Image (cartoon, grey):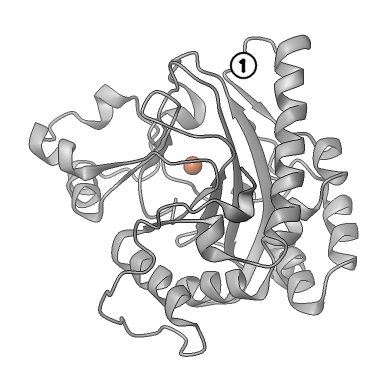
């Protein structure tokens, strides 16, 4: 069924949440509801159809093409036992509508309203997460460290059910319990470590599991909320994760996770209108000392 004719359920974005302070009045009602949900819960689930951003069809075509390359690679190339395959720069450079889509004015307005500051765009990562049930890397509970407040904008490229590696995130209520339990903030934990001393009832109601059809989109503050990709057991999961934070993030060393080089990102920026270019070239706004920070080489 063509994407444009599919209607996905919009879980939250059309809600009637009370308007918090600090939200730009230039946002449309739908987009403002997304920001309100993010402020309240740290996460908002919607869909490509509901968002109806410009060139969604072209973006999705490119994203599915990248996914196809990952599937082929997983089938025929040696993968050294990795539980997750990540699209390479070459995969993406031939299909840059994936990146370009994320720099549309409406999404940037949403992101900047939530961040309360001009956005930096760190590119997109496209993953194939194998249905092997292993718990490791981003499949363990963790917080992202790029900034104190940030947004990932994720798109499922296949239908994702409980056994297919759904994204999981803590509610603010459970996050508070977890934060009150230990002094550390960024520890990565297995499921049994994460739930220790948490009452079963609090755990049952405090973990949100984001199952959804292909084309489901969720925006989530991955610095504020512990989260993980639940280890898929029966099916592989394919997804895109766009990353945004402030132009002077708290931890620049933890940024630049794109598989594109700085030069490739700069070349892409040259093809963009001013606003998008400023988002991609965020490092240029850093104080000079922070610009000396080397490129992050951490991978899954
Ligand atoms: Fe993460």
Q: Residue at x 46, y 33 (%)?
A: 160
Q: Is residue 21 left or right of residue 205?
A: right
Q: Residue at x 25, y 22 (%)?
A: 192
Q: Quadrant of residue 281?
A: bottom right
Q: Is residue 51 above or below residue 66?
A: below
| Residue 275 horizontal/vertical position (percent) | 74, 77
| Foreground residue among 82 and 187 | 82
For label 1, the crowd category at 10 Å Cα-Cα, with few meaning under 14, some 14 to 19 and many 20 or more, is: some
Tell whether circle 1 marks a residue whose Cβ is less than 8 angstroms from ligand 1. Answer: no
Q: Is residue 109 left or right of residue 233?
A: right
| Residue 65 horizontal/vertical position (percent) | 77, 37
Q: Residue at x 83, y 69 (%)?
A: 272
* Residue behind mark 1: 82
| Foreground residue among 142 and 32 | 32
Q: Quadrant of residue 289?
A: bottom right
| Foreground residue among 39 and 233 | 233
| Foreground residue among 59 and 4 | 4
């Amino acid at each position: 069924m063509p994407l444009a004719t599919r209607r996905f359920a919009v879980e939250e974005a059309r809600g009637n949440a009370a308007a918090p302070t600090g939200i730009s009045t230039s946002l449309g009602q739908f987009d403002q509801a997304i920001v309100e949900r993010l402020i309240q819960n740290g996460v908002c689930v919607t869909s490509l159809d509901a968002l109806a951003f410009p060139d969604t069809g072209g973006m999705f075509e490119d994203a599915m093409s990248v996914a196809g390359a990952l599937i082929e690679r997983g089938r025929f190339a040696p993968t050294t036992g990795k539980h997750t395959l990540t699209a390479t720069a070459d995969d993406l450079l031939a299909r840059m509508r994936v990146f370009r889509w994320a720099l549309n004015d409406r999404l940037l307005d949403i992101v900047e309203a939530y961040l309360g500051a001009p956005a930096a765009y760190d590119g997109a990562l496209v993953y194939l997460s194998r249905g092997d049930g292993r718990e490791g890397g981003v499949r363990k509970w963790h917080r992202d460290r790029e900034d104190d407040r940030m947004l990932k904008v994720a798109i499922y490229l296949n239908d994702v059910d409980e056994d297919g590696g759904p994204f999981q995130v803590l509610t603010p209520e459970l996050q508070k319990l977890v934060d009150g339990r230990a002094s550390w903030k960024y520890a990565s934990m297995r499921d049994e470590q994460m739930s220790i001393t948490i009452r079963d009832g609090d755990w049952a109601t405090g973990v949100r599991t984001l199952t959804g059809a292909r084309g489901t989109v969720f925006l989530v503050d991955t610095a504020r909320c512990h989260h993980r990709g639940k280890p898929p057991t029966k099916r592989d999961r394919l997804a895109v994760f766009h990353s945004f934070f402030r132009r002077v993030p708290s931890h620049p060393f933890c940024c630049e996770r794109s598989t594109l080089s700085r030069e490739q990102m700069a070349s892409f920026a040259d093809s963009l209108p001013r606003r998008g270019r400023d988002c991609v070239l965020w490092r240029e706004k850093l104080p000079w000392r922070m610009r000396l920070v080397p490129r992050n080489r951490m991978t899954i």
